[in-house]
Amino acid sequence: MTQDLYSDARLYDLLFPADKAAVDFYRTEAGGRGGHVLELGCGTGHKLIPIAADGHPSIGLDLSLDMLTEARQKADERGVSVEWQQGDMRDFNLDNEFDLIFIAGNALLHLHEADDIVQCFRAVRRHLAPDGRFAFDVFNPNLRLLADADGVRRPRTSFTDPGRGEVHVDVADAYDAAAQVTRGTWHFSTDSEPDFQTVSIEVRSIFPQELPVLLAHAGLRLVERLGNWDGSPFGADSSTQLCICESAA
């Protein structure tokens, strides 16, 4: 049976371990802003727990209870205080303002409709402190890769599971150009357990010229767009759109 990836926090952490460069980037952003920090789509806390450990009052919001349970356990094990909230990034009210709000790891791309993205951005703007910043990262769509997403199952990656050993991951991606959504089925196998788990992942593509328009509709302004965690300028060949925004007025 196919299930949502975010219902299995342990599998998620094995498949997507913490990216040190991304963690360091958001820690630096938090350090430069000071004050309160909010992460939307916080997952299992890869980035927010280190930020909270630096002394920033932090809230993590996610739709998945399983991911939040894992995040809470990790924070408790490190003795780090974080407020974890279940909620939808499109519609939340935390009765607080934040000096940094961020959405990491392509989490924004789980919002497939333009209206949903704008609704999320508006909720962000309502929660930004007067001089606060909003940061997020999404991939830069690659037309060749999207064209190759033809629904055929192909090997994608592998990782080591302490309980199972080497796990091989095959992916069948299909791109819906009208919706700008890639729908993937990910198959997990070991030599002794073929297809022991199958999960679905659906992500939207946001093209570079769309982003400033979507932000403007929500009263936000793109201050800077980088192409990598090292601060490289964004360009046509960049794999990532790393965006820093502020309230437009």
Image (cartoon, rainbow, N blue to C red):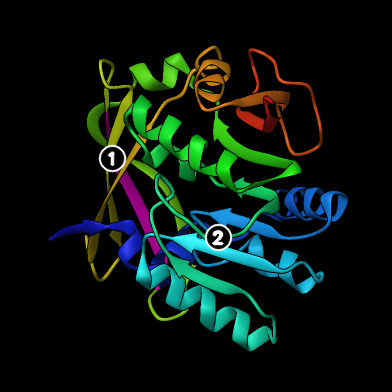
User: Does residue 136 lie above or below 89 as drawn?
Assistant: above
Q: Dots 1 and 2: beta carbons under 8 Å?
A: no
Name the spot of residue 101 as percent of width and height, x first: 64, 49
Prevailing secondary structure of the magenta residues: strand
Q: Amino acid at mark 1?
A: Gly
Residue found 66% across the figure and 40% down from its top: 134
Residue found 75% across the figure and 42% down from its top: 130
Compared across the picture, whether 29 is left or right of 177 comes to right
Q: Amino acid at mark 2?
A: Asp
Name the spot of residue 77 as percent of width and height, x first: 62, 87
In this view of the protein, can residue 190 be seen by the observer? no
Mark 2 closeness class: few <14, some 14–19, many ≥20 residues within 10 Å = few
| Residue receiving disc 2 | 95
Q: Please name which of the two marks, 1 or 2, marks the residue nearer to the observer.
A: 2
Name the spot of residue 51 as percent of width and height, x first: 74, 64
Q: Quadrant of the N terminus?
A: bottom left
Query: In the figure, residue 66 lies in which quadrant?
Result: bottom left
Mark 1 closeness class: few <14, some 14–19, many ≥20 residues within 10 Å = some
User: Does residue 33 lie above or below 145 as drawn?
Assistant: below
Q: Earlier in the sequence, mark 1 or mark 2?
A: 2
State which region is magenta.
165-174
Compared across the picture, whether 33 is left or right of 225 comes to right
User: Does residue 186 lie above or below 7 as drawn?
Assistant: above
Q: Disc number at residue 184?
A: 1
Residue found 36% across the figure and 52% down from its top: 169
Q: Indicate the secondary structure of the residue bearing disc 2.
A: loop
